[in-house]
């Protein structure tokens, strides 16, 4: 059984590498001739292709619950659990809105991939600026909302293993309060089937649950952050009970 899982994982990785290289080259060459929105739609399609290929090759199924809670046209911030690279692909591919992840600007220095990423127009933060980086977010994020984007942050700040609980960072809650935008917590158990730093992908069903919309009005960042963490971690006990005994 382990040998079959390894072989299937190897096939998936080979497909992933080949598709990444060809897609990145295609977008890079198309930058002068295409719009930012077109490039995002292409990447969104590639993300769906990758998630569906993982399902076909490795048996990693997926279910979305309460996806309709994401508003069709109102600004909102998604604050998501982060266990693997899977959710980056799945959220981009299946949330029916244009998403902007908040990521470090240093990624733009990567050959080819960095130029393609920059061309999508998502929100990047220059961490070298320290506290000024948050001031940058307060100033620029409303422009993204005005264009119809949804902001996505991982409040844990890093990928965590199933069952691991760490204190959530308050950056997402602070941005929500400063811009007056509500948040939606997202719980998921991707780490059970696409473990971080693991070659093998294991068959099973990844469940993604979108929580209720939480208003940021008349709240402190600590209150909002604690409510988001409480909702996500309580939901994780339902999604991954064996890890939360």
Image (tube, rainbow, N blue to C red):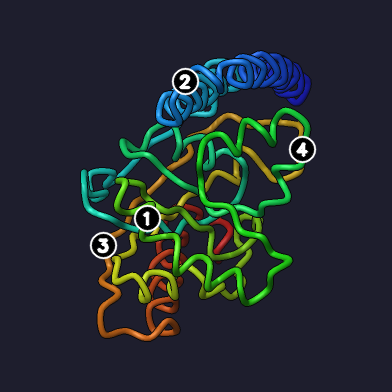
Identify residue for label 2: 34
Q: Earlier in the sequence, mark 2 or mark 3?
A: 2
Identify residue for label 1: 143
Q: Residues within 10 Å of mark 3 (few under 14, many from 20)?
A: some
Q: Say what secondary structure mark 3 lies in.
A: loop
Task: Give the number of callouts.
Answer: 4
> Along the line of sight, which residue is nearer the eye, 111 or 159?
111
Q: Earlier in the sequence, mark 1 or mark 4?
A: 4
Q: Residues within 10 Å of mark 2 (few under 14, many from 20)?
A: few
Query: Which image quarter: residue 126?
Result: bottom right
Q: Say what secondary structure mark 2 lies in.
A: loop
Q: Residues within 10 Å of mark 4 (few under 14, many from 20)?
A: few
Q: Residue at x 38, y 52 (%)?
A: 144
Identify residue for label 3: 213
User: 155 left or right of 116?
Assistant: left
Q: Nearer the viewer, mark 4 or mark 3?
A: 4
Q: Say what secondary structure mark 1 lies in.
A: helix
Identify residue for label 4: 110
Query: Which image quarter: residue 235?
Result: bottom left
Query: Which image quarter: residue 28?
Result: top right
User: 65 left or right of 113?
Assistant: left
Image quadrant in which the N terminus is located: top right
| Position of residue 97 measured from the top left corner of the image (x, y, whole percent) | 32, 39
Q: Nearer the viewer, mark 1 or mark 4?
A: 1
């Amino acid at each position: 059984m382990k040998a079959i899982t390894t072989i299937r994982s190897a096939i998936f990785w080979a497909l992933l590498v080949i598709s990444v290289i060809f897609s990145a080259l295609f977008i890079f060459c198309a930058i002068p001739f295409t719009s930012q929105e077109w490039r995002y739609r292409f990447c969104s399609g590639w993300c769906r292709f990758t998630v569906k290929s993982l399902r076909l090759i490795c048996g990693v199924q997926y279910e979305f619950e309460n996806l309709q809670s994401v508003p069709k046209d109102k600004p909102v911030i998604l604050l998501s659990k982060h266990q693997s690279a899977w959710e980056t692909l799945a959220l981009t591919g299946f949330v029916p809105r244009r998403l902007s992840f908040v990521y470090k600007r240093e990624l733009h220095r990567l050959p080819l991939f960095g130029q393609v990423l920059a061309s999508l127009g998502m929100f990047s933060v220059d961490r070298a600026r320290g506290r000024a980086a948050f001031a940058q977010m307060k100033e620029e994020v409303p422009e993204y909302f005005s264009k119809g984007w949804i902001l996505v942050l991982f409040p844990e700040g890093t990928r965590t293993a199933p069952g691991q609980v760490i204190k959530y960072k308050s950056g997402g809650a602070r941005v929500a309060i400063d811009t007056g935008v509500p948040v939606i917590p997202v719980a998921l158990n991707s780490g059970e089937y696409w473990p971080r730093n693991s070659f093998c992908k294991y068959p099973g069903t990844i469940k993604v649950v979108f929580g209720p919309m939480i208003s940021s009005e008349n709240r402190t960042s600590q209150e909002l952050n604690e409510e988001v963490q409480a909702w996500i971690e309580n939901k994780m006990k339902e999604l991954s009970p064996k890890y939360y005994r």
